[in-house]
Image (cartoon, coloured by chain):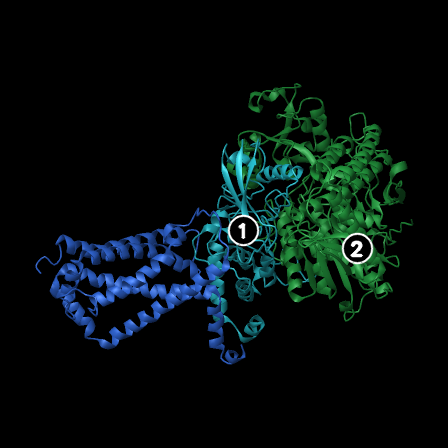
Chain colours: A blue, B green, C cyan
């Protein structure tokens, strides 16, 4: 302890993060960043309905500010790492806290979503890696992948049914993850009130559903020919 | 045996101040050289342990449960009295003193009761400061209610869970001292023997309930705070584990046992439903504030309550006691319930019950008004009986609830063994022959927080204590006794379960020495208990070993003690040839059936001395003087 | 009614334990669950078999001593009810009931359905009190407490420390128990001086006793016999964040050991 005692800020952060409550705050805070990104990303993606030019211009616009782009990417990377590391540490705590499991155990109040965060999370993480390789770097993209041709890349990618299906499944899981995560963020940060908590819970559910619907609409539009029919 | 009650001379108002001034003090630096054992962690034990540790003594506290927070004080519902007069309704220390002496039917020590009333105000302050969430008025001041027939509102409460909250306050104070290292807490550890060296209590022998290890603990003083012995009746409102073992084993080592026949029967309990019944559940007495008690006028009336019109109902308490009505003291309410059931007018399947009816109150206050006051009690009733008391009247019947008797103590709360202090329900206490509602919590905390810490210091400062350790021959001999008893219990291997003996003992006492007693029934009880005890030692079935968690063995040891105490209880009841408070001898009643005291012959506390197995216990009398509250016939008409 | 019981039998802490099947015949609907087990134990005793060990004391739902899992639910199927207050009328002929002890690293099994919950006492020792020694209290009405605050404190203070929250939590967290005590004392003016030190101490102790972490899913609230709300956990989190932010060196040194 003495080595960190010299620096009270380090010491304070150490003690904070040492507790599971501190880890959860880290998880909540990084969750806020990631959620913010998802909102921006969804709004960006919705431009697919405005046509190829708009979409490609948007991509070019983002790439015209490399400092900002890489700054955001760095922040996202840090948040993802923080989110994942804290969740792994908490999960290890969980298995240590109940080494002998029940012969019979019923869940009577918790939602399916809340109990499956440790499944939905890793699947989403795996999806994100694939998603970047598919549409950002093109390493796992469609044969026609071209750098910065966002609209075409997207359409060609989603015409591959397995890719579209994986995307849709991932977005359903994301919806569940957000459904519990959004409300849980408030609870972890200590925001709770008998009057507002039910409202927050309901709002979290709607936001999660709307976001999933927004994202899922894209591959469906591609597959049904609503988007990219001219390609 | 000489009984020196050590009551300070002079006016009663100054007695406690005078006593405190005259007490010797232990130098602050010397306190850490003393060690104290406290047995029990309820209101009395936890408050005493915490307070002694705060003063600097080294305390070892024992409880048989898994945590000190489980002690049965936790189940007290109604409230705690204090002469704060916050309601400006004419209350005072003197009035609380007067009510308590009168309520106890003039069988308590005046000076003790006066001190209790004085200290009551400090208790509330202490508990508030600890964070006990007492009920509050909208202005933020403490709320009060009238309770158990008191004419003033002096009862402080925390919903229907006052005992819980007060106990948690004391428990938290105790845990704070555990954290500071001044208290060593030994849970799941049962006291099975008392070590007396050179005539002074110097330690105890315990059994670790998980490993079965028998161990000696040495100290400079021993405090018993192990609660009452109501479970001698098997069915009572006490917790399943409540027992008399600590005080009984101390009695057998020389501590006098006072007034064992003073047992309190609480009028508002949920009736017995079958042979399997393991305990009785109390419904707070506060229910009598709004509920009306009645039975059908006709004998054997099997109609459902709503089919019986008002004219055919007998609201017997309102009829017999117009000024107190349903709020008469506990003993009066209980006896009247028994009387109407004996007449064949009892209700429910067993005929052992009376109605407690809220329909008038629901009309007056609305169901929501009732829910606000008694919601949790109504829910509890429905959970247990499956009936909804908002629609059907509750059925209630009296049950053993509290024992006013206990080890005899002087004004300093010290027993007849020097260095052995007894506090809370375990001592013969300040309640005389009948305890008023909301007074038990008050007494337990008064003893633990504000009396014992002074009187124990006085004892330690004045005693010349030899240095002893657990290698002393006395500890060996007590340990041997304890081990021998364990071996004996485990070797019987008879054909009856320990519970069946306990049930039979309880049934005998309830029928022959319960709400009312007479010479013949008491003589019969003594005979029956002796036979039962004999059978127990020849035919009880205790399985398992002594070196493991063995709940049957724990129970067997406690029942063995109850089988001895039960006999003393009946002997005491036989000796006290008068009626007073909860002790109702059928031979002694007024023409309209009220208890008739005999102050000429029985104005004393009966302190019994153990005379060996099979010996006739020796009676010592501490005469009681009433200089401030002249004895009168209690009247609640 | 007749029931089939599958009860966890474990001789002592080192025995691996197993489920054993028992038949409970002629169970009366008015019995409490523990009375049903009492009857079973008497039958086992007369047959010369070791009776089932389980904890109970007050048997009126307030001491918190009893508790085990019935078909995977802490304290059984009735909400807001301890197992001692659960009555057999909740069950029906032929039901199969699985009885298991609370399971958590922090609550090691002692025997059968009996577990060691002393970890809860240690959490209280770490700060679940107000440091006011006997005799030093001001008059009870000297500090006014708004009624809503007193009521909220009482809601949280109703906790009986039975451990059902830990047992029901998939993470075996003690968040509801710890949060309840923190909230009780934080709502009252008397609890303010030690408020932030208290939360740091108690939270650290829960970690040292190897309780898991809360994932805000609400199983604890659902099984709590006193219906302590999840809000108390949010309150604890809030105080923890504030306390961590304002943490001073001396507190750290004290808490670091």
Tell me, for residue B479, which label it has, or none.
2
Q: Nearer the viewer, residue A98 or B607?
A: A98
Q: Is residue A220 left or right of residue B240?
A: left
C57 vs B570: above or below: below
Q: Nearer the viewer, residue B284 or C220?
A: C220
The residue most toward the right is B2
Pointer 1 residue: C102
B537 vs A118: above or below: above
Q: Is residue A164 left or right of residue B423?
A: left
Residue A173 x/y as whole percent: 31, 55
Residue occupying the point 80% across, 66% down: B26
Q: Quadrant of the C terminus of chain B?
A: top right
Residue B528 x/y as whole percent: 80, 32
Q: CA distance from mark 1 to mark 2?
A: 35 Å
Q: Chain of mark 2?
A: B
Nearest-to-viewer mark from 1 and 2:
2
Q: Secondary structure at mark 1?
A: loop
Q: Mark 1 Cα within 10 Å, few/some/many (few <14, many 20+)?
A: many
Q: Nearer the viewer, residue C113 or B241?
A: C113
B402 vs A95: above or below: above
Q: Chain of mark 1?
A: C
């Amino acid at each position: 302890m003495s080595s960190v005692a010299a620096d009270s800020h380090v010491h304070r952060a150490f003690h904070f993060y040492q507790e599971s409550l501190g880890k959860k705050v880290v998880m909540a805070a990084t969750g806020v960043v990631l959620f913010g990104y998802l909102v921006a990303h969804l709004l960006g993606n919705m431009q697919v309905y405005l046509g190829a030019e708009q979409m490609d211009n948007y991509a070019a616009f983002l790439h015209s500010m490399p400092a900002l782009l890489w700054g955001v990417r760095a922040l996202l990377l840090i948040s993802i790492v923080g989110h994942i590391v804290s969740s792994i540490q908490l999960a290890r705590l969980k298995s240590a806290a109940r080494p002998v499991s029940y012969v019979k155990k019923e869940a009577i109040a918790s939602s399916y979503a809340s109990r499956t965060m440790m499944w939905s999370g890793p699947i989403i993480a795996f999806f994100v890696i694939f998603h970047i390789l598919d549409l950002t770097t093109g390493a796992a993209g469609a044969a026609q992948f071209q750098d910065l041709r966002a609209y075409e890349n997207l359409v060609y990618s989603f015409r591959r049914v397995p890719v579209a299906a994986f995307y849709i499944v991932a977005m359903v899981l994301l919806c569940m993850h957000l459904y519990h995560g959004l409300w849980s963020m408030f609870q972890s940060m200590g925001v709770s009130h008998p009057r507002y908590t039910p409202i927050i819970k309901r709002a979290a559910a709607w936001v999660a559903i709307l976001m999933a619907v927004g994202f899922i609409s894209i591959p469906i539009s591609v597959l049904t020919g609503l988007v990219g029919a001219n390609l | 045996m000489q009984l020196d009650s050590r009551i300070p001379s002079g006016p009663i108002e100054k007695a406690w101040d005078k006593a405190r001034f005259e007490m010797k003090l232990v130098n602050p630096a010397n306190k850490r050289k003393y060690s104290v054992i406290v047995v029990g962690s309820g209101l009395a034990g936890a408050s005493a342990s915490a307070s002694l540790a705060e003063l600097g003594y080294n305390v070892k506290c024992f409880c048989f449960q898994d945590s000190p927070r489980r002690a049965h004080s936790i189940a007290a519902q109604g409230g705690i009295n204090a002469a704060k007069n916050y309601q400006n309704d004419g209350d005072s220390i003197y009035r609380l003193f007067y009510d308590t002496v009168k309520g106890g039917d003039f069988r308590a020590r005046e000076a003790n009761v006066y001190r209790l009333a004085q200290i009551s105000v400090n208790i509330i302050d202490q508990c508030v400061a600890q964070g006990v969430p007492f009920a509050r008025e909208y202005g933020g001041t403490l709320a009060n209610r009238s309770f158990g027939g008191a004419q003033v509102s002096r009862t402080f409460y925390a919903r229907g869970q006052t005992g819980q909250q007060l106990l948690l306050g004391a428990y938290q104070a105790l845990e704070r001292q555990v954290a500071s290292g001044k208290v060593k807490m030994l849970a799941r550890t049962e006291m099975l023997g008392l070590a007396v060296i050179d005539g002074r209590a110097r330690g105890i022998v315990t059994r670790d309930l998980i490993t079965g290890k028998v161990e000696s603990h040495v100290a400079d003083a021993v405090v018993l705070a192990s609660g009452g012995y109501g479970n001698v009746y098997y069915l009572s409102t006490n917790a399943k584990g409540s027992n008399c073992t600590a005080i009984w084993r101390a009695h057998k080592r020389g501590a006098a046992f006072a007034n064992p026949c003073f047992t309190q029967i609480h009028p508002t309990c949920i009736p017995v439903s079958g042979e399997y019944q393991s305990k009785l559940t109390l419904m707070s007495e506060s229910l009598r504030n709004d509920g009306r008690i009645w039975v059908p006028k006709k004998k054997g009336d099997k109609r459902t309550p709503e089919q019986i019109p008002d004219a055919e109902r007998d609201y017997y308490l309102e009829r017999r006691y117009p000024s107190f009505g349903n709020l008469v003291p506990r003993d009066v309410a209980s006896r009247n319930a028994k009387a109407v059931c004996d007449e064949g007018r009892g209700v429910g399947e067993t005929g052992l019950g009376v109605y407690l009816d809220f329909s008038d109150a629901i009309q007056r206050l609305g169901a929501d008004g009732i829910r606000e006051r008694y919601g949790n009690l109504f829910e509890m009733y429905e959970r247990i009986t499956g009936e909804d008391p908002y629609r059907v009247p509750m059925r209630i019947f009296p049950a053993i609830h509290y024992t006013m008797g206990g080890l005899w103590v002087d004004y300093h709360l010290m027993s007849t063994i020097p260095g052995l202090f007894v506090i809370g329900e375990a001592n013969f206490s300040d309640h005389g022959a009948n305890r008023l509602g909301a007074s038990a919590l008050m007494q337990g905390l008064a003893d633990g927080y504000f009396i014992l810490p002074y009187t124990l210091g006085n004892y330690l400062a004045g005693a010349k204590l030899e240095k002893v350790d657990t290698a002393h021959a006395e500890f060996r001999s007590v340990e041997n006794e304890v081990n021998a008893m364990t071996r004996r219990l485990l070797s019987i291997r008879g054909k009856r379960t320990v519970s069946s003996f306990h049930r039979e003992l309880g049934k005998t006492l309830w029928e022959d020495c319960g709400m009312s007693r007479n010479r013949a029934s008491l003589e019969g009880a003594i005979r029956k208990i002796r036979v039962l005890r004999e059978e127990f030692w020849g035919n009880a079935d205790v399985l398992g070993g002594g070196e493991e968690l063995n709940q049957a063995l724990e129970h067997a040891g406690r029942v063995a003690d109850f089988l001895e105490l039960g006999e003393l209880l009946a002997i005491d009841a036989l000796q006290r040839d008068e009626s007073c408070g909860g002790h109702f001898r059928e031979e002694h009643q007024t023409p309209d059936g009220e208890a008739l005291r005999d102050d000429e012959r029985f104005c004393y506390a009966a302190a019994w001395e153990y005379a060996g197995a099979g010996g006739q216990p020796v009676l010592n009398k501490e005469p009681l003087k009433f200089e401030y509250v002249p004895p009168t016939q209690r009247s609640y008409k | 009614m007749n029931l089939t019981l599958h009860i966890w039998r474990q001789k002592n802490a080192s025995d691996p334990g197993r489920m054993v099947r028992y038949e409970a015949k002629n169970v009366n609907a008015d019995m409490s669950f523990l009375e049903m087990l009492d009857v079973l134990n008497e039958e086992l005793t007369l047959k010369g078999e070791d009776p089932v060990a389980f904890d109970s004391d007050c048997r009126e739902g307030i001491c918190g001593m009893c508790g085990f899992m019935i078909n995977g639910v802490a304290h059984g199927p009735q909400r807001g009810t301890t197992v001692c207050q659960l009555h057999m009328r909740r069950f029906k002929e032929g039901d199969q009931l699985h009885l298991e002890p609370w399971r958590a690293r922090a609550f090691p099994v002692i025997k059968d359905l009996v577990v060691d919950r002393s970890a809860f006492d240690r959490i209280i020792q770490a700060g679940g009190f107000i440091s006011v020694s006997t005799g030093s209290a001001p008059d009870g009405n000297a500090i006014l407490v708004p009624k809503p605050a007193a009521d909220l404190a009482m809601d949280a203070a109703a906790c009986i420390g039975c451990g059902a929250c830990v047992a029901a939590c998939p993470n075996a967290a003690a968040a509801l128990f710890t949060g309840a005590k923190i909230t009780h004392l934080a709502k009252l003016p008397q609890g303010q001086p030690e408020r932030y030190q208290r939360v740091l101490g108690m939270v650290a102790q829960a970690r040292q006793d190897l309780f898991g972490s809360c994932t805000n899913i609400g199983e604890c609230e659902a099984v709590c016999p006193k219906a302590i709300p999840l809000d108390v956990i949010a309150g604890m989190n809030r105080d923890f964040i504030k306390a961590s932010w304002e943490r001073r060196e001396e507190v750290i040194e004290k808490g670091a050991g």
